[in-house]
Image (cartoon, rainbow, N blue to C red):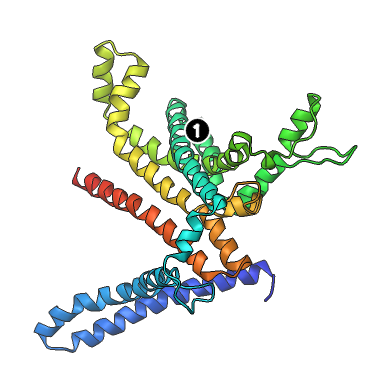
Amino acid sequence: MSDDPFLKIVNGLVAIVLGVGGTAALYWVLNLLVGLLPGKWDRRIKPYVFVGPAVLVVTVFLVYPAVMTVIFSFADANSINWVGLANYTALFQDDEFLGTLFNNLLWILIVPAGSVIVGLLVAVLADRLKALPERIAKSVIFMPMAISFVGASTIWGFVYATRFAQGDKQIGLLSAISTSLGFEPVAWLRIQTGNLNDLLLIVIMVWLQAGFAMVLLSSAIKGVPDDTIEAARIDGASEVQIFFKVVVPQIWPTVIVVFVTILILVLKVFDIVYVMTGGRSGTSVLANTFFVELFEFGDAGRAAAVVVVLMIAVIPVMIYQMRQFKKQEAR
């Protein structure tokens, strides 16, 4: 395959045109065929004609793989012989896997809350600026959202990089600062004390998601009626009281939506851990464990069991998210 960037762009555009055009042509043909039926059957069948392809795609690419994954989680490494709950038993008796679950819990507790707090802080401060400085500040904070997780990990690799050879100049920001202060070089991503290496990886995700949180929360803050804020000021409330007792309650539904959306993303985190550490030094997460079990150890049964554990963890969060969307629509 050619590495010519222009050719890749052309291929992408052709794929988009053919995909959109093919879909439009399919629905046009189906609509034409249904229109040839008698009026009563036309009205009965037409809704299913338009919904049918979408249901088929969801079934083939989402439902069927999910069902087969659950089935294979009860089979052996080659997905041939049934082993019952052996894969799940082996996982939950494995100290390394329990450490992985703890790492995921750490990500869940810190990343959504950290992203919302940073995004809300930036949104509040940026909204106090004039129009041009506000746009510049928000663009800078939002810019990481345009970077892939792999790209962001590569960038932060230069922050955490360490050279141990005598006389080598440190290119990592943390190591450069620490060695300039007279300390010895440190392999930051190998420090498991206090889960420091996990926390350093978590910082990358917060950096990536803070812009997303800022945009939505800033929009919500701008939607708060000025009358309520002015009324609070007349009553003698301080700016801090106004923020926590007037602004936050009115933007709380948006805060919940942002929090849960980032939480779902965090449950599936993989790229950052794989690129930065490969799951070594106690930094593995569920998605990385699945990758290792399937592609390094070739154990499809345990890999499927890991995915099932991840799906079970995601389902309650998704249900809660759907309920929040319904509540917002009701308002």
Q: Residue at x 51, y 49 (%)?
A: 98
Q: Where residue 329 sits: x, y (%)?
A: 22, 48
Secondary structure found at label 1:
helix
| Residue 25 visible, this orientation | yes
**Mark 1 crowd level (few <14, some 14–19, many ≥20, 10 Å Cα):** few
Q: Residue at x 38, y 56 (%)?
A: 312
Q: Residue at x 67, y 38 (%)?
A: 191
Q: Residue at x 27, y 49 (%)?
A: 325
Q: Is residue 9 left or right of residue 119?
A: right
| Residue 209 visible, this orientation | no
Q: Is residue 266 left or right of residue 217?
A: right
Q: Quadrant of the N terminus?
A: bottom right
Q: Where residue 240 sits: x, y (%)?
A: 37, 18
In the depicted structure, whether residue 14 falls above or below residue 120: below
Q: Is residue 282 left or right of residue 268?
A: right
Q: Where residue 188 sits: x, y (%)?
A: 69, 38
In the depicted structure, whether residue 11 falls above or below residue 237: below
Q: Nearer the viewer, residue 71 or 164?
A: 71
Q: Quadrant of the C terminus?
A: top left
Q: Mark 1 sits on what residue?
A: 132
Which residue is the extreme one toward the left?
40
Q: Nearer the viewer, residue 130 or 183?
A: 183
